[in-house]
Image: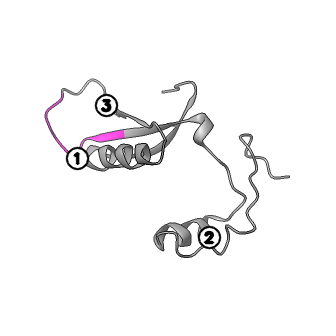
Amino acid sequence: MLICGVRLFYTGPVINTEMLVVMLSKHGIEATQEFVDLDRPEDGDLNREANVFVPEEDVVYLDISVEEAMKTIMSGGIYTGGLEEAAVVGKERVLP
């Protein structure tokens, strides 16, 4: 599904997506969530798959490798080896 003005940020169990939306809102990012299967009735299943969308204006593309990004994420932000020199490449995702 294509929704204008937002980007898909995460897909996973609703128990994770609800927590992620709250965490993002605490950082000023108004994320939304939507169930992947809209035809399935609401049954309280916390493992039901959902998408989290973030506003396009909150998306920043960086010129870093996947490995550097994962090191930063897994360290909780303690490791920032690739971020000091990272260039913001813009919405086009085209490297200069």
Kindly identify which residue carries mark 2.
68
Helix, strand or loop under label 3: loop
Magenta-drawn segment: 42-50
Mark with earlier residue (3, 2): 3
Q: In the image, what residue occupies the spot 18% across and 26% down? A: 41
Could you say which disc has been placed on residue 47 in the image?
1
Going by the numbered disc 1, the residue's amino acid type is: Asn
Residue that appears at 73% across and 46% down? 93
Q: Which residue type carries mark 3?
A: Asp
Name the residue at 46% across, 70% down. 76
Q: Quadrant of residue 56?
A: top right
Q: In this view, does 85 lie to the left or right of 28?
A: right
Count of marks, rendered view: 3
- Kind of residue sitting beneath label 2: Glu
In three-dimensional space, the C-alpha distance between marks 3 and 1, rounded to whole angstroms, equals: 12 Å
From the image, state whether disc 3 or disc 2 is nearer to you. 2
Distance between the alpha carbons at the discs numbered 3 and 2 = 33 Å
* Mark 1 secondary-structure assignment: loop
Residue of label 3: 37
Residue 12 sits inside the magenta stretch: no
